[in-house]
Image (tube, rainbow, N blue to C red):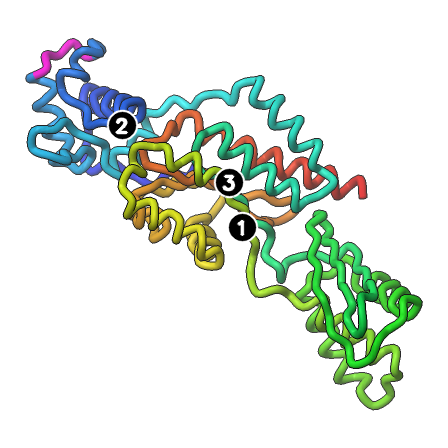
Amino acid sequence: MQSRLTPRRDLSQRDLEILKDVVLAHIVNAEPVSSRTVARFGRTGLSAASVRNIMADLEEWGYLSQPHTSAGRVPTRDGYHLFIDTLMQAEQVPEENRLYIEEHLRESSSDAEHLAGVTSHLLSELTQQVGIVVTPQPGKTVLKTVELIPLSGRQVLCVVVSATGFVDNTVIETEEPVGREKLIRISNYLNDNFAGMTLVEIRDRLLAMMAEERAQMDEVMGLTIELARKGLAPRAGQEVMVDGTSVVLSHPELADLVRVRCLLETFADKARLVQMLNECIKGEGVRVVIGEDSDLTSQLDFSLVATTYGTDQVMGSLAIFGPTRMEYPKVIPLVHYLGKRLTRVLKESLSES
């Protein structure tokens, strides 16, 4: 897991224990935590008055905040990061959850699009937060096969299957109707000459072919280049699969209708969602983004726990998105495990194809 926080000052072991107790109590109860509650844990052997003084210091140092004068305290962004980086004891993903994940991923392994959707559902189901999976960037898609199928009139369906199993369909309009046999010949030519190349490489090669062969290009080659140019062009953006929006609405943090509206607007603009997710995911391992760490999480005062997946290179990302009061000891190992398992299943599916 990527670490991002260096404590602003040397905290004593007692300071750290009290901060840890506040975080754990707030995660469970979703309420500001009082000094009396922490003292009742009995782990530090301090009175409520002594605990109150230390909590006041932690607030002054930026690790806790007090929503109201008479209320207890809640962890800040820095408080959560310090807990995650130095105090948290990560849990093992339970064996029954591992078996459950394995069963569902294996059942979907022949269809990468469905596999991504299943992964987002598993993330949500096992954490009661929003599960997100971002599919590979279109320009990096490596072509496995392309099939051109005649539709009615002058329309042709171009079915592109990537090396990792993701499928993309595009309807192409031609100047004249094209017969099935000619489309089969063109499909075979494209598969023989472009399989194994990325869509960006294919686009560049097609542009070069158009320049090289413009003078002597015959009808079939001209049609081949035109169909490939339209059907194999890299798409504008990545796809994002979101599951569990209705689940997260049950959290007390979403009792405010303004925040509900903001949440729904965040997921409605999928292009912006993908952009913000990509900005959050940098480097390897699991990334934890909290509150003001990014535009995505600051809008709702939410957290994002995310990692990447991919066979030989980064293909996409998967994440948990929800209120900052989430079970990080459980969520972080689960996100890491699912990222590794999704990568493994995609790699095995690729080697079998």
Residue 153, by quadrant, is bottom right
| 1 vs 3, front mark | 3
Quadrant placement of the N terminus? top left
Give the camera-side residue of 300 and 189.
300
Tell me if mark 3 has few (under 14), some (14-19) or many (20+) residues whose alpha carbon lies within 10 angstroms of its own: many
Residue 307 visible here:
no
Q: Which residue is mark 2?
A: 30
Seen from this angle, which residue lies furthest bottom?
Answer: 215
Give the camera-side residue of 178 and 210.
178
The disc placed on residue 243 is: 3
Tell me if mark 2 has few (under 14), some (14-19) or many (20+) residues whose alpha carbon lies within 10 angstroms of its own: some
Q: Which residues are magenta?
A: 44-48
Seen from this angle, which residue lies furthest right?
Answer: 181
Report, in whole angstroms, how far the alpha carbon at label 3 lies from the one at label 2. 23 Å
Q: Name the residue rendered at 73%, 61% in the picture.
A: 197
Disc 2 marks a residue whose amino acid type is Ala
257 left or right of 135?
Answer: left
Instruction: Residue 166: give x, y in percent of width and height.
Output: 69, 50
Q: Name the residue rendered at 12%, 24% in the picture.
A: 54
Instruction: Residue 40: give x, y in percent of width and height.
Output: 18, 11
Give the camera-side residue of 43 and 223.
223
Report, in whole angstroms, how far the alpha carbon at label 1 lies from the one at label 3. 10 Å
Q: Main secondary structure of the magenta part?
A: loop
213 left or right of 290?
Answer: right
Instruction: Residue 74: give x, y in percent of width and height.
Output: 21, 31
Q: Earlier in the sequence, mark 3 or mark 2?
A: 2
Report, in whole angstroms, how far the alpha carbon at label 1 lies from the one at label 2. 30 Å
Disc 1 marks a residue whose amino acid type is Val
Instruction: Residue 247: give x, y in percent of width and height.
Output: 43, 34
